[in-house]
Image (cartoon, rainbow, N blue to C red):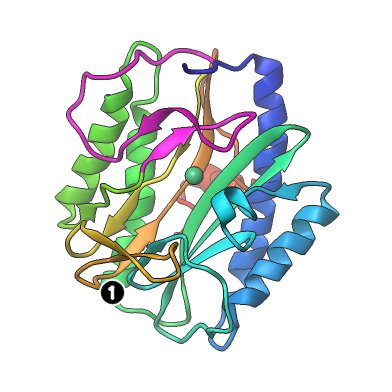
Amino acid sequence: MIIYKSDAEIEMMKKSSQIVARILSELKEMIRPGLETRELDSYAETRARELSAVPAFKGYRGYPASLCVSINEEIVHGIPSGRRLQEGDIVSLDFGVVYEGFYGDAALTVPVGQVSELALRLIAVAEKSFYRGLEELKEGNRLSDVSAAIQQEVEKAGFSVIRAFVGHGIGRSLHEEPQLPNFGLPGHGPRLKRGLTLAIEPMIAAGHWEVEVLDDGWTAITRDRSLAAHFEHTVALTGNGVEILSLDSLEVEGLKAGRTANA
Ligand code: CO
């Protein structure tokens, strides 16, 4: 069952999502060669608690950290460790919190120093596919219209959409109905209506979409070891159209100036 949210509940979700946005922006600024990924995790956890929020992932189905840090061919759910970021890596940061009973969830992929043209293009396409999917999030459309738009944008660029993980409803739980695949044919699934709150999260690969999970039980990588990128926001469909709840205020200024968040 999909749990539709009132305007007041969406405002609450915006608070949680804004905490996530701010912490992700701060983490992005910390990214440099030599940084241990667990330093990002402890920063995220400390900041969340400073802002009176609780990290959403720690302990979720036994996940051992607050932040997911996924490097290069790692797609999602990378566990922070003593591994150091290296010049040329791309690193995906996925973070969520619960604040006053509501969840916020967002992710982005960041270059470490100078990276390849391919890596930059992959990151840009992940972000662009999110925005393309978002354009279809309007009353009267169906859920799979969002999925299909994301897939089309990704495949147009010659990349592939990861099938094994999906976006999701979000609210008083981290994962609510509906599931939102990043691929599929348009015209299927529930009709979109006001009050729908989703974490839209395209995960894409430069090569094939097949995944493997490492022996740690969490880290998902591309089977062909091609680079992967992830981009996620918590969004709401309101009476005034769509709102990105987890957009950092600095990013908002950038969008007004006609730039996208990574440009
Ligand atoms: Co999510």
- Which kind of residue does numbered mark 1 sit on? Glu
Image vertical order of residue 234 relative to residue 117, above or below: above
Q: Is residue 211 left or right of residue 9?
A: left
Crowd band around label 1 with a 10 angstrom C-alpha radius: few (<14), some (14–19), many (20+): few
Percent x, y of residue 257:
52, 47
Which residue is at 40% across, 56% downward?
230
Query: Where's residue 70, x and y in %?
Result: 45, 67
Query: Where 261 sits versus 119, above or below?
Result: above
If the image is split into quadrants, where does the C terminus sit? bottom left
Q: Is residue 177 magenta?
A: yes
* Residue beneath the point at 68% across and 21% down: 9
- Residue holding disc 1: 117
Depth check: give the residue in front, 131 or 64: 64
Q: How many marks?
A: 1
Task: State whether residue 30 appears in this view.
Answer: no
Q: Residue at x 36, y 33 (%)?
A: 180
Q: Nearer the viewer, residue 21 or 198?
A: 198
159 or 42: nearer the eye? 42
Residue 19 is a magenta residue = no
Residue 45 point in image, percent of width and height: 73, 61
- Residue 196's x, y, as percent? 50, 20
Secondary structure under tag 1 reads helix
What stretch of residues is rendered in magenta?
166-195
Is 74 above or below relative to 175?
below
